[in-house]
Amino acid sequence: MTGDRENKGPGDRAGEKRDRPAARFHGRVAGTGRQCAVAGCDQAGEFRAPPEDGGLASDRPPQYRWLCLDHVRDFNARYNFFAGMSPDEISHAQRPYAGWERETRAFATAGADRPPPWADFSDPLDAIGARFRNRMADEAARRDGKPLSESDRRALKTLGLATDADRRALRARYSELVRKYHPDRNGGDRSFEAKLQGVIAAYQALRKSPAFA
């Protein structure tokens, strides 16, 4: 003789599985002995929800109800964040920057979380200062006022040229690097071919740039 469990087919077992909340269902608190707060429901109350009036007042501890899976799904489907608000309150809450008017503690300029000034850091090897100066040099404008695009700056870095290099310095540096990386100057060694191609591309880009016109 076999039991009912053995007589059930795959479809019946799948139906049972769908009817039961998963053990790891998000927000589920099982085994507390609570009953669903909806009148007439005898299912376990395993999911927390705000009260019917939406009142989570800030002047008292939060008040919650405990609902079964079906009723918490129904509550979520009907939930309206703006319920009970006046038109002005709804408009205020819908502003794109609502909630961003105040600084957070992490970024506040006053209070215990204020970051220490740079003078408080010990930098004996000048690592921080040197990095800052290099970045400023990379972003500096030319003294002659000619514009430099981001691609121009990358090309200058590839050639190892300063921001204020002129057309004559550009040609001289290009010739120097071509001689350095060309296979004919390295006994046929082609291991520098990628660097040579980078140098040629950087030179061609800068040669047509307004900064070197």
Image (cartoon, helix red, strand yellow):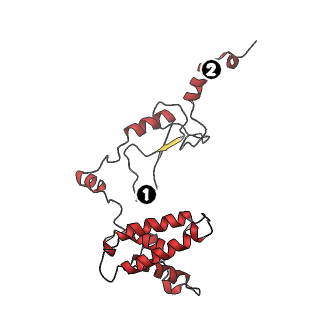
Q: Secondary structure at mark 1?
A: loop
Q: Is residue 107 above or below residue 4?
A: below
Residue 167 relative to residue 15: left or right: left
Residue, x 58% and y 71% (percent of image)? 185
Crowding near pointer 1: few (<14 within 10 Å), some, many (20+)? few
**On the rendered image, what quadrant is the C terminus found in?**
bottom left
- Which quarter of the picture shows residue 108? bottom left
Answer left or right for 144 relative to 181: left
Q: Residue at x 38, y 47 (%)?
A: 54
- Give how far across and how far down residue 34 sits, in percent: 56, 40
Amino acid at pointer 1: Arg
Q: Which percent across, then down, holds residue 3?
A: 72, 16
The N terminus lies in quadrant = top right
Identify the residue at the far left of this view. 87
Q: Which residue in the structure is indicated by mark 2?
A: 10
Front residue of this view, candidates 34 and 17: 17
- Camera sees residue 48: yes
Judge the density around disc 2: few (<14), some (14-19), many (≥20) Cα neighbours within 10 Å.
few
Alpha carbon separation for disc pair 1 and 2: 50 Å
Q: Residue 88, percent across and down?
A: 23, 54
Q: Residue at x 47, y 47 (%)?
A: 64
With respect to residue 90, does 142 lie above or below? below
SS of the residue under disc 2: helix
Q: Earlier in the sequence, mark 1 or mark 2?
A: 2
154 with respect to 209 (left or right): right
Q: Nearer the viewer, residue 197 or 74?
A: 197
Q: Which-is-in-front pick, marks 1 and 2?
A: 2
Name the residue beneath numbered marker 1: 60
